[in-house]
């Protein structure tokens, strides 16, 4: 027996997903190639001696996973063990590992032209830009292609400053917008900060986190699952939202000049742990920012391309249209690519000097990204994200109601966070070592997920958007067993 969050004793057999053995993994009709490469010991020796020490620092798991091959939602290690991938290379593989349609397009272009730059005129970049623009609302129709999300956010900062003539940019605490010297200022998490001058002119305001923040309630989020916090807000009113907007106004009054360049926000925080804001927060924040001369920038690096299910872009779920949209990760299903999309007026300010990007708009990248858009549309990927994601969220909420250490379940579509706590009353983060134990157990049972949050306390579930309900049930059973084992040890 152990104690549930309600304080009552519960027999082990009462748990919905309780199992005495690892559940059977869903079938897969793909057979990976036999691995014949270097040994695991050799790889680790090279990783330690020849790769920058940062590579070891970010290596997941005490017993690392040695990946060999991937197909759709599946990965195989060098020993032939199969894993259900629910992190997608950090929310990057959008339509599936080595998706046949995307792979075929890449091979076809590789046989034709690997590389040229935009100093020449070549079909793939124009075909792709026209297609991508068709997925965005007016007046967001002008595109500049990059190689990564950090680079896209760097350029968005520059464009905002050039267009407005102002310098200061506001982001949320707990945000992550990249690790380049400029975007490090946008990022508000000590783990990603270096003790050197970077990102000058960036100010962080309070994150309107309705679970961990000062204010929250039970009707705040645009999500199938709300927090366990209670509120007595009258119909049509959100006191938490009013208070967080008050904090933004306070930032305007105390921390920045009267005129600013921009406001950056992810529609749902990714690295921050799938944090969601009150429903009307961004709408009101955008209005306040524009009154002060600033432009509004939506970082869609993780939420874009149908991941939230209800909409193709995360900002659409907030009922707003930004002035600049940045994107990467899922744009190329893992192929290095990013983009800045903005209005003709803002784009024109970028031409005040010359900016040249050798690889941005690479013909292979554009061909791959075009195939990704076609695949999302023709295979109903966005709808699948909505259906499977909603199912996962509602089932995870049942586990939250069972286990004292699950404080919050949140997200939309297949952008999901599960925040782990010592107990529901204090909402203090579950210690790193405890989160690590559960994380390792889940991996050993054949599922890969991510971690995030300010204290590394939130499990991130952002899989390739081709996963099935059967896959979801397998993960839920594995997750339940890992939690159950931890509670028994505790």
Image (cartoon, grey):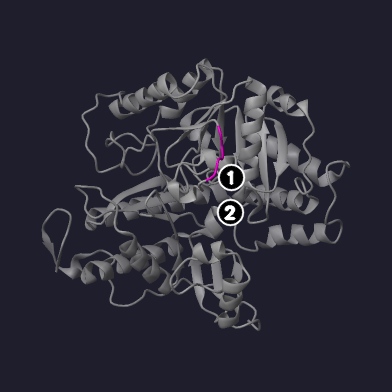
Query: Which residue is farthest right?
Result: 120
Query: Which residue is farthest left?
Result: 8
**Picture coordinates of residue 227 (x, y %)?**
29, 42
CB under 8 Å between discs 1 and 2: yes
Disc number placed over residue 94 in the picture, else none: 2
Q: Which residue is mark 1?
A: 305
**Picture coordinates of residue 62 (x, y %)?**
43, 72
Q: Looking at the image, which residue is at 52% across and 34% down? A: 315
**Picture coordinates of residue 428 (x, y %)?**
26, 50
Residue 332 on the magenta span: no
Image vertical order of residue 477 relative to residue 131, above or below: below
Q: Secondary structure at mark 2?
A: loop
Would residue 18 be seen by someone viewing this image from the given angle? Answer: no
| Mark-to-mark CA distance, 1 and 2 | 8 Å
Residue 199 on the magenta span: yes
Q: Which residues are magenta?
A: 196-200
Of residue 481 and residue 286, the one placed in the foreground of this image is 286
Would residue 457 be seen by someone viewing this image from the given angle? Answer: yes
Image vertical order of residue 32 relative to residue 463, above or below: below
């Amino acid at each position: 027996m152990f104690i549930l969050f309600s304080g009552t004793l519960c027999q082990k057999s009462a748990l919905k997903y309780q199992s005495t053995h690892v559940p059977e993994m869903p079938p897969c009709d793909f057979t990976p190639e036999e691995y014949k490469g270097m040994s695991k010991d050799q790889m680790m020796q090279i990783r330690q001696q020849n790769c920058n020490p940062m590579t070891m620092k970010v290596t997941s798991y005490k017993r690392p996973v040695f990946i060999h091959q991937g197909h759709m939602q599946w990965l195989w290690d060098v020993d032939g063990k199969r894993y259900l991938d629910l992190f997608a290379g950090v929310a990057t593989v959008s339509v599936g590992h080595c998706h046949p349609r995307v792979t075929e397009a890449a091979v076809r272009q590789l046989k034709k032209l690997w590389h040229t730059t935009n100093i020449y005129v070549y079909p793939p970049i124009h075909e792709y830009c026209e297609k991508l623009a068709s997925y965005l609302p007016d007046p967001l129709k002008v595109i500049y292609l990059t190689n990564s999300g950090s680079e896209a956010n760097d350029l968005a900062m520059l464009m905002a400053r050039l267009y407005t003539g102002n310098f200061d940019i506001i982001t949320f605490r707990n945000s992550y917008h990249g690790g380049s010297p400029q975007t490090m200022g946008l990022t508000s998490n000590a783990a990603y900060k270096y003790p050197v001058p970077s990102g000058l002119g960036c100010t962080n305001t309070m994150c309107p986190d309705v679970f961990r923040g000062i204010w929250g309630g039970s009707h705040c989020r645009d999500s199938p699952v709300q927090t366990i916090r209670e509120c007595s807000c009258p119909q049509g009113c959100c006191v938490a939202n009013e208070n967080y907007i008050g904090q933004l106004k306070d930032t305007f009054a105390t921390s920045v000049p009267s005129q600013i360049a921009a406001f950056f926000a992810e529609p749902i925080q990714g690295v921050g742990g799938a944090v969601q804001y009150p429903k009307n927060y961004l709408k009101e924040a955008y209005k306040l920012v524009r009154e002060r001369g600033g432009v509004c920038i939506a970082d869609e690096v993780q939420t874009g391309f149908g991941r939230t299910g209800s909409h193709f872009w995360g900002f659409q779920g907030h009922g707003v249209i930004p002035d600049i949209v940045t994107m990467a990760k899922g744009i190329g299903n893992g192929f290095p690519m990013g983009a800045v999309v903005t209005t003709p007026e803002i784009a024109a300010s970028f031409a005040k000097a010359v900016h040249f990007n050798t690889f941005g708009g690479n013909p292979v990248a554009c061909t791959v990204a075009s195939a990704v858009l076609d695949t999302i549309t023709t295979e109903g990927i966005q709808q699948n994200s909505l259906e499977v994601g909603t199912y996962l969220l509602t089932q995870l909420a049942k586990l939250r109601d069972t286990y004292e250490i699950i404080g919050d379940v949140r997200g939309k579509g297949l952008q999901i966070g599960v925040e782990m706590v010592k107990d529901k009353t204090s909402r203090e983060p579950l210690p790193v070592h405890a989160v690590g134990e559960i994380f390792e157990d889940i991996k050993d049972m054949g599922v890969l997920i991510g971690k995030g949050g300010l204290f590394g306390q939130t499990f991130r579930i952002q899989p390739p958007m081709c996963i099935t309900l059967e896959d979801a049930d397998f993960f839920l059973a594995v997750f339940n067993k890992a939690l159950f084992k931890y509670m028994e040890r505790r």
